Image: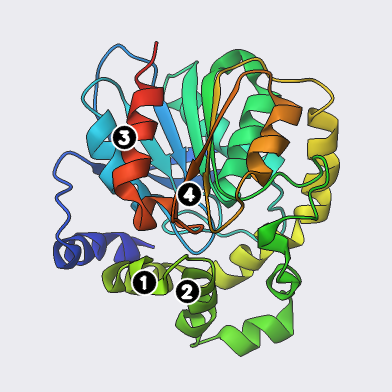
């Protein structure tokens, strides 16, 4: 883990990213070690940024720089990803949200604004549903909410094999071939694979998940969907009342996530990002980052 974290600076330099104000930190939360990025200071409500599958907290660096002038910004690696612990067993999104909540409380913050992409949006919703009085606003970015509405009829589920690709055979097949497997997501879920993740980021994330336990944990996110669906169906019985921004890719989930969000929250603002696939931060930063900053800067 230390070797992985120490390699971050070299990768960032290769990608041309300036991260002088962003600190790599770790803490024990919910009985496991979590790695997280932190930047900023100020009196405004802290923002928590949650990454998705095939990525880590690293994906948020371009956004952190835009938010850290007014508040603390925290971007953890979810359990199983990046520099965080990779225990066997539990990877349902309710539990991952409890990890993040324990981290936030341990850092001395009570109320937050929370943002999630892909698997991270599921964790963000689970956080808000479990701790509604501690969440000021929510952003969900391109994927879906298991167990909510007609959740199996969505773009990301048309190609079902990867959601059932786990277990010992899957682990043996991808060992040493993590990059080949991840290219399916980075290329096929993009509107244009040449405008998806950069080569430097592809190398970075491949190395992150190739760590011992990384791929097994990643498969665990999918394996837990049945439990997530049951949990989320229960959460959805009580609608959230916080402002919620939903950003989706025109060539990805389209309006589906926006319609799902309206089933779980009464104050939904939905935006379809034109010309983008699933990788909103990478494919359409000029559209996405200003919308995130505007929403998160609202009082």
Q: Name the secondary structure under disc 1.
A: helix
Q: Is residue 69 above or below residue 143?
A: above
User: How many marks can you see?
Assistant: 4
Left or right: 87 as drawn, with respect to 74 = right
Q: Give SS at disc 4.
A: loop
Residue under pointer 3: 290
The crowd level at tag 2 (other Cα within 10 Å; few <14, some 14-19, many 20+) is some
87 or 193: nearer the viewer: 193
Q: Counting residues from the N terminus, which is met first, the one under dot 3 or under dot 4?
A: 4
Give coordinates of residue 222: x percent, y percent: 70, 61
User: Can the viewer see residue 273?
Assistant: yes
For residue 168, what is the image quadrant?
bottom right
What distance separates the C-alpha of mark 1 from that of mark 4?
15 Å
Up-down relation of residue 160 to residue 282 (above or below): below
The residue at the point 54 percent across, 80 percent down is: 181
Q: Which residue is mark 4?
A: 51
Residue 299: x, y in percent?
39, 10
Nearest to viewer (mark 1 / mark 3): 3
User: Which residue is tagged 2?
Assistant: 187
- Position of residue 42 relative to residue 130, above or below, is above
Q: Comparing marks 1 and 2, which lies closer to the viewer?
A: 2
Disc on the earlier residue, 3 or 2: 2
| Sequence-first disc among 4 and 2 | 4
User: Sequence-wise, which precedes: disc 1 or disc 2?
Assistant: 2
Residue pointed to by mark 1: 202
- Secondary structure found at label 2: helix
Residue 90 lies, in percent from the top left, at 71, 53
What kind of element bears circle 3? helix
């Amino acid at each position: 883990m230390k070797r992985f974290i120490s390699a971050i600076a070299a990768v960032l330099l290769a990608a041309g990213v300036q991260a002088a104000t962003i600190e790599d930190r770790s803490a024990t939360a919910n009985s496991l070690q979590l790695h997280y990025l932190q930047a900023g200071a100020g009196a405004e409500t802290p923002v928590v940024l949650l990454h998705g599958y095939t990525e880590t907290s690293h994906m948020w660096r371009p956004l952190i720089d835009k938010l850290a002038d007014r508040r603390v910004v925290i971007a953890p690696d979810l359990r199983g990803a990046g520099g965080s612990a990779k225990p066997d067993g539990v990877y349902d999104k309710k539990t991952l949200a409890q990890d993040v909540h324990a981290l936030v409380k341990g850092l001395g913050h009570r109320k937050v604004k929370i943002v999630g992409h892909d698997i991270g949006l599921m964790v963000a919703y689970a956080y808000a549903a479990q701790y509604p009085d501690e969440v000021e606003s929510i952003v969900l970015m391109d994927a879906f909410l298991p167990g909510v509405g007609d959740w199996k009829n969505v773009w990301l589920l048309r190609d079902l094999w990867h959601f059932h690709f786990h277990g010992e055979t899957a682990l043996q097949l991808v060992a040493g071939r993590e990059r080949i497997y991840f290219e399916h997501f980075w290329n096929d879920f993009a509107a244009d694979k040449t405008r998806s993740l950069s080569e430097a980021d592809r190398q970075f994330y491949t190395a992150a998940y190739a760590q011992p336990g990384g791929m097994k944990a990643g498969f665990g996110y999918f394996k837990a969907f049945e439990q997530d669906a049951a949990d989320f169906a229960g959460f959805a019985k009580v609608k959230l009342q916080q402002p919620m921004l939903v950003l989706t890719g025109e060539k990805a989930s389209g309006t589906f996530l926006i319609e799902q969000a309206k089933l779980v929250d009464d104050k939904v603002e939905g935006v379809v990002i034109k010309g983008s696939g699933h990788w909103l931060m990478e494919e359409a930063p000029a559209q996405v980052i200003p919308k995130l900053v505007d929403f998160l800067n609202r009082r």
